[in-house]
Image: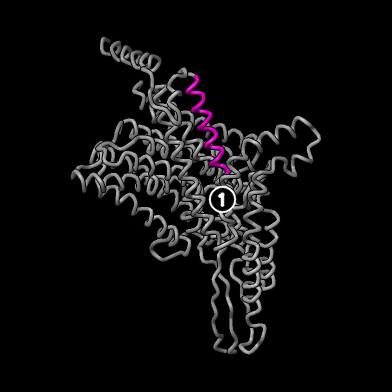
Amino acid sequence: MASAHKHIAENISRLSNILELEKCETYLLFRWETDLGAGIRTLLYFLGLAYCFIGLSAITARFFRSMENVVKQTRKVVKIDPSTGNEIVRYEKVWNYTIADIALLAFGTSFPQISLATIDAIRNIGELYAGGLGPGTLVGSAAFDLFPIHAVCVVVPKAGELKKISDIGVWLVELFWSFWAYVWLYIILEVWTPNVVTLWEALLTVLQFGLLLTHAYAQDKRWPYLALPLTERPEDWVPAEATPCEYNSNAYNDLSEINQVGEDEIRGVVDIFSIHSRNETGLVYEKVSVNDGSAECSNKDTQDNISLKDSHFLQLWKQQFEDALMLERKESRKLNNVYLRVASMSWQLLLAPWRFLFAFVPPYHIAHGWIAFICSLLFISGIAYIVTQLTDLISCVTGINAYVIAFTALAGGTSWPDLVASKIAAERQTTADSAIANITCSNSVNIYVGIGIPWLIDTAYNFIAYREPLRIKNAEGLSFSLLVFFATSVGCIAVLVYRRMTLGAELGGPRLWAWLTSVYFMFLWIIFVVLSSLKVSGII
């Protein structure tokens, strides 16, 4: 009884320490920030954090556009038909759909968390203890991906509409590696080398991302001994082949986007899942005579198309800046309500600084989108650095444990691209493959890349400089969060499996059941956040 009273007294003492803090002398830009009251500083820093998240959403729209162009890249393959002597010209996609989902889509949507964790690791380089901001954000992001995003996706389809996972084999592979990632993290923190991370553990963590890619590709190609013996993917999921003329028109359709630069960003919707669209060109075949003058017709049209786009490069870039400074959009002009138009213009004014800054990203039409892709990642990294600074200040001013901020505000803000991506997939695709695959893949990427690379940087430096491993602050709290996440995620997956067995699909269905499932998923997320926050704060 005495020990129980003592434990309660200690908890009350911790809470009182949070309420009675010493003045935080750290500031963001100006020294006079320290003269402001703690409440005003906290409010300003939280507003700055929210504005950074708005910037992340804005640059993510441009990032998705560039990624879409990267995935659309095709290569020309010419073969000779031995029976007829005619050339067979094939235009096939460079990227495999499954690999694109993991390496580009999941990595891209998780890049805010990855860059934040990497910046946190670089800031702590040379320290014997790892920063807690990165791991806390990534574990919290995994919970946000699994619970709130599933909660949104399950109610997106129209009433009665069902959307199921078609390629169940690939999803099971991705799900296995997603669960194993968090089991592996727990083994590192509590079993092999408690409270420390060695260089070899960090290296093995990163290498497992390659194993995930290999296993998923093997399942997609149905390799013997490596693939699960499941039925083949249904035909209506595989992108249909197109005729040569359709390829030609698709090439010129890209040019029609010149006059539409920024429109999708205005609506906040980007079709990043066209790699799985039924109307998307997969493989294009042309069968012509070797001596036929039209043998290179399609290729010539494509080259003309590229030249035309190159000639409009500066015009495209100029249009980006004009769109960034435009406060009244087409949609707002159609509004009859004056207050709604003013609200729309106010929102555009709020976004204008971000839009102008991101207009410096080159148009995504050039170099298959790679230049815009890389530039977008650099901007995301810059915003992530500001987010880490603001988070440190909020923790300093309020006394709130950095892990708690990471589990809640940072996890939700940096996972916004994941939410947008999965919601778009649930709306536009006939199946639930990409919507759910993006969630499971993002969770795997969070551990293998998002935690693996920062730990590899710090452990390598500590090994070379001090011959010491990397120690983890509050490893007990992080391990507890992993256990809570694992338990709640089992409850989430069990419901998805039950819906598959009863309704025949993971997403959609009768509105009542869809909303009940959504509420259940949100309840699991609240359980994770509350228990994890209480543990890392030392209250339980």
**In this rendering, position of residue 76 left or right of residue 532:** right
Query: In x, y percent, where is residue 453?
Result: 35, 48
- What is the crowding at mark 1: few (fewer than 14 residues within 10 Å), some, or many (at least 20)? some
Q: Is residue 239 left or right of residue 245?
A: left
Residue 55 drawn at (x, y percent): 55, 40
Secondary structure predominantly adopted by residues drawn in magenta: helix
Judge whether residue 92 is colored magenta: no
- Residue 423: horizontal and vertical position, in percent? 59, 44
Near-viewer residue (339 or 99): 339
Task: Please indicate whether residue 40 sits to the left or right of residue 446 in the image.
Answer: right
Residue 456 vs residue 169, the one in the foreground? 456
Quadrant location of residue 136?
top left
Which amino acid lies under the numbered mark 1 shown in the image of this protein?
Answer: Phe
Residue that protrudes farthest toward the front in the picture? 31
Residue 74 percent coordinates (x, y): 56, 68
Position above or below: 12 against 162 = above
The residue under label 1 is: 360
Residue 292 in view (yes/no): yes
Quadrant including the C terminus: top left
Q: Secondary structure at mark 1?
A: loop
As displayed, is residue 441 above or below residue 536?
A: below
Q: Residue furthest left?
A: 467
- Placement of 192 over or under 290, stated as above or below: above
The magenta segment: 40-58
Determine the image quadrant of residue 57: top right
